[in-house]
Amino acid sequence: MTLTISKFRRLLPLLPVLAVTVFTVACAPLTVPPKSEYPVGRARLVLPPGAWQDLGTSEEATSSPAGRTPLQTRAVALRGVQGEWLAAVRVQTNRTGDLRGSPQGVGYCPPQQDVVVKDPADGSPVRADCLRFKLWASSPKWLEKNRPDLGQWMASRQIALSTPYAHVSYRYVTEAGVWVAVDALVDQRLISVRPRNNEEFLVAGLPFQQWAYDLAQAVRLSAGMVDGHLAIPPFPFPTPTSRP
């Protein structure tokens, strides 16, 4: 009995180490889930499921009545099962919560040929609520002519989406100076169905239209949240398993 107690006493100093070791092994995750949230300025970007890749941030500024308003842009892109690019999203927000009012004429949201334009702010000079979307943004030279900045950015990052792809642009600015702008280029297979007849052709773009509306609503909600929580809505259709 004395020998048994002696051996037990010699083990006592090791028990905390053994306990910690066992606890650590038991609680260690078997896999590390992909990151689905990224900070961008005053906001928190939350992405839908998928193999998203962070493309980093950049710093910009815009003029406001109280001076220059610093902004930050974060870009992310979605890869498919074969490593191809399926979507690219850029989000721009106030760099901090220091709001300085909206820039003059920020609500300018003119019509655009072959693009659906929605402007609930009705051209307000002090706030913006400008949504634009085009299902066939991969039409020859369309991006180059209408959004050369976006085309140049994609070229600089060597991002080439499979065609056809769609484009959504949304800018929301409050009179107080909350600023959120989003650009999204998305493989059509994620947001539309390929029509097989005239009837399907007439409704093929409805899922994309709804996704654009949902994106705009997510941005509006983000502007009113303390942490700027911006949840990009899930795409209507699953990630394709093969190239187009």
Image: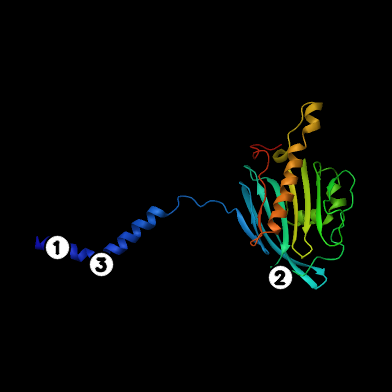
Q: In this view of the protein, which residue sits in the foreground, 65 or 80?
A: 65
Viewer-nearest of discs 2 and 3: 2
- Where residue 46 appears, as percent x and y from the top left, is 63, 53
- Where residue 140 appears, as percent x and y from the top left, is 85, 44
**Quarter of the figure that contains the N terminus:** bottom left
Say if mark 1 contacts mark 3, CB within 8 Å. Answer: no
> Residue 5 — which label?
1
> Residue 98 — which label?
2
For badge 2, the amino acid type reads: Asp
105 to 115, vertically: above or below? below
Q: Which color scheme did the rendering employ for the protein? A: rainbow
At x 16% / y 62%, what residue is drawn?
Answer: 7
Find disc 3 in the rendering and name its residue.
Answer: 13
Mark with earlier residue (1, 3) = 1
> Residue 88 — which label?
none
Say if mark 2 contacts mark 3, CB within 8 Å. Answer: no
Q: Residues within 10 Å of mark 3 (few under 14, many from 20)?
A: few
For badge 3, the amino acid type reads: Pro
